[in-house]
């Protein structure tokens, strides 16, 4: 069998598992390992602490065990996430604390350390909602309290005080029973899923309560001269009575408001000026004016808030920067930023972290309102430009139709050959030139004084007669039966009819021989040709948006449909088949399936 040289020398080549692991790859593996052992870390921390209690007076060995205890605690602690990076300042502070514990280690320092651990675990007890995790942390807290008041605190008391015989040994053997309770909880592996969430207020309350119990016990022993057990039970009884009285005063029965209601009113009264400023901000947003004026008025009202002496503001929106000041300068300056706004607030006294967060929230809201005002101004400008565009498109459409009419007349005059043709051309010019002149005057009048989309109203027979004269030389059949007292919006009907007939005549150039019919029945106007059908893709967007056009601007039908909609009419493709393509204009109240 063949053997490699490395195998013959007794060495195998390195595999993928034996390859060196880079620090970037080792970090996820370490975090995964910590996740697997995390439910057992708290038990390890408490077990190492109990080892410190067993060591007793051997300070050298205790300091070595203290290092392992602190290391386990750092792996479990819920204050800093495992993925977080510690800066140099935090590492120096941590090293100073560990060094102080090592140097000043003794029964008193160990008792204080256990008080801090009890507060840390107590914050987890009040936060946990599931039964299993809560019992898990209650077992840890029970161990810390039992070990503190039976082992650590009696060792830290000054010599000469009366202590029960054997309390130290009893605590060393009985306190680990709480650790067995933690092992017996079925859901202890789920107890650490919310490890990085801590109720600081509850933890501080537990810490202060145990500190009062320890100090009260010491005071009772020194003042009353009783032994440790009686002093502890007496202090515990007084604390229990005070807690019961405080709980009753916080929420008394019988419909009376207690300390809880008073505390709630006090907290709400602190936020009342800020709520009033928010109400004034919403009211200012409804007023007209430039966005920078809105920011200036809102910033001036910040002077009414408590602790605010003045400030400065600067905006970065609207194309150019604006800035201003309000109030007066103070000893303290706090800068807040929004993507479109910078605001500096001056106060006479330093602000707490909660107030700084509160003011930052107010500035963010002001920035959002300012951004909304900028968007409203931009929409107003775009609406103005849209109105200008619509007016220009409408006039361009009229000028295009007039140019087509003039081209038709020029073509008829150029092709006239012989006395009869010249006479017919002169008659055509005599009929059409006054109409074109009137339409030019109407277009100029629109430039001077904009009119509604429907324009002037005129009798239906008169409008039908003018259309018959208008398209007499274009081979367009004009049909209709109208009542003498029926009036139509002449400008709208004329614009729609000219646009539809111009498109049909252009279609006739590609498909010679098709007929074009303009028909007016009551208020319904239709233009029909016998050519090919419009492509379905083009028919879907023909009246809804501009379309590509080789003979015009591509906005004729779209503009006509918009004019009809503004005047209360609807322009639609009524029929689209081979040999019959018909557009219809009628009042919008008429059903869309009205007969043609």
Image (cartoon, rainbow, N blue to C red):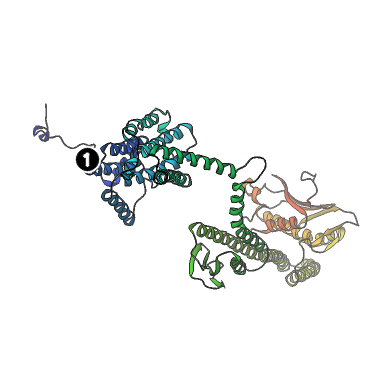
Residue at 62% x, 52% y: name it: 265
Residue 197 visible? The answer is: no
Q: Nearer the viewer, residue 373 or 576?
A: 373
Q: Nearer the viewer, residue 308 or 432?
A: 308
Position of residue 560 measured from the top left corner of the image (x, y, whole percent): 72, 57
Q: Residues within 10 Å of mark 1 (few under 14, many from 20)?
A: few
Q: Quadrant of residue 384?
A: bottom right
Residue at 30% x, 41% y: name it: 69
Q: Which residue is mark 1?
A: 19
Farthest residue toward the right? Answer: 484
Q: SS class of the residue under badge 1?
A: loop
Residue 178 visible? The answer is: yes
Farthest residue toward the front? Answer: 225
Position of residue 254 measured from the top left corner of the image (x, y, whole percent): 67, 40
Locate residue 51 relative to residue 296 in the image: left or right: left
Relative to 492, is 35 above or below?
A: above
Q: Quadrant of residue 172?
A: top left
Position of residue 290 measured from the top left corner of the image (x, y, whole percent): 63, 68
């Amino acid at each position: 069998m063949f053997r490699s040289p490395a195998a013959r020398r007794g060495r195998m080549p390195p595999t993928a598992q034996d390859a060196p692991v880079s620090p970037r790859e080792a970090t996820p593996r370490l975090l995964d390992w910590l996740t697997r052992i995390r439910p057992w870390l708290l038990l390890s921390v408490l077990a190492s602490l109990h080892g410190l209690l067993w060591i007793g007076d051997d300070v050298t060995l205790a300091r070595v065990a203290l290092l392992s205890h602190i290391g386990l605690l750092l792996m479990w602690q819920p204050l800093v996430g495992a993925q977080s990076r510690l800066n140099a300042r935090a590492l120096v502070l941590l090293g100073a604390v560990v060094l102080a514990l090592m140097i000043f280690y003794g029964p008193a320092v160990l008792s204080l350390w256990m008080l801090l651990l009890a507060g840390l675990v107590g914050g987890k007890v009040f936060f946990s909602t599931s039964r299993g995790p809560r019992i898990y942390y209650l077992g840890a807290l029970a161990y810390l309290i039992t070990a503190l008041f039976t082992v650590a605190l009696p060792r830290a008391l000054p010599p000469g005080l009366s202590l029960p015989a054997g309390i130290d040994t009893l605590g060393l053997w009985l306190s680990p029973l709480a650790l067995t309770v933690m092992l017996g909880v079925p859901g202890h592996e789920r107890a650490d899923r919310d490890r990085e969430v801590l109720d600081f207020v509850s933890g501080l309350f537990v810490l202060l309560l145990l500190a009062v119990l320890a100090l009260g016990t010491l005071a009772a022993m020194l003042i009353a001269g009783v032994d440790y057990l009686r002093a502890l039970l007496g202090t515990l009884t007084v604390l229990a009575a005070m807690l019961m009285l405080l709980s009753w005063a916080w929420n008394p029965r019988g419909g009376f408001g207690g300390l809880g209601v008073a505390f709630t009113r006090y907290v709400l009264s602190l936020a009342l000026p800020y709520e009033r400023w928010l109400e004034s901000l919403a009211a200012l947003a409804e007023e007209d004016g430039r966005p920078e004026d809105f920011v200036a008025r809102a910033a001036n009202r910040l002077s009414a808030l408590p602790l605010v002496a003045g400030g400065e503001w600067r905006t970065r929106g609207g194309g150019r920067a604006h800035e201003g000041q309000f109030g007066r300068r103070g000893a303290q300056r706090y800068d807040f930023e929004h993507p479109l706004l910078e605001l500096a607030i001056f106060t006479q006294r330093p602000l707490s972290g909660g107030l700084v967060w509160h003011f930052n929230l107010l500035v963010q809201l002001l920035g959002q309102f300012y951004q909304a005002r900028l968007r409203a101004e931009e929409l107003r400008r775009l609406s103005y430009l849209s109105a200008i565009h619509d007016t220009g498109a409408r006039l361009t459409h009229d000028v295009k139709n007039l140019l087509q009419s003039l081209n038709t007349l020029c073509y008829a005059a150029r092709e006239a050959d012989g006395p009869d043709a010249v006479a017919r051309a002169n008659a055509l010019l005599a009929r059409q030139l006054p109409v074109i002149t009137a339409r030019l005057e109407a277009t100029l009048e629109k430039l001077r004084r904009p009119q509604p989309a429907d324009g002037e109203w005129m009798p239906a027979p008169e409008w039908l007669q003018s259309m018959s004269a208008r398209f007499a030389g274009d081979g367009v059949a004009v049909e209709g039966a109208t009542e003498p007292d029926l009036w139509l919006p002449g400008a709208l009907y004329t614009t729609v009819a000219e646009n539809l007939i111009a498109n049909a005549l252009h279609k006739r150039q590609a498909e010679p021989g098709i007929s074009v019919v303009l028909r007016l029945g009551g208020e319904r106007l239709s233009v029909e040709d016998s050519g090919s059908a419009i492509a379905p893709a083009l028919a879907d967007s023909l009246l809804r948006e501009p379309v590509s056009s080789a003979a015009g601007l591509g906005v004729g039908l779209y503009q006509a449909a918009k004019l009809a909609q503004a005047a209360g009419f609807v322009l639609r493709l009524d029929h689209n088949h081979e040999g019959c393509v018909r557009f219809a204009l009628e009042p919008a109240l008429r059903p869309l399936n009205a007969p043609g």
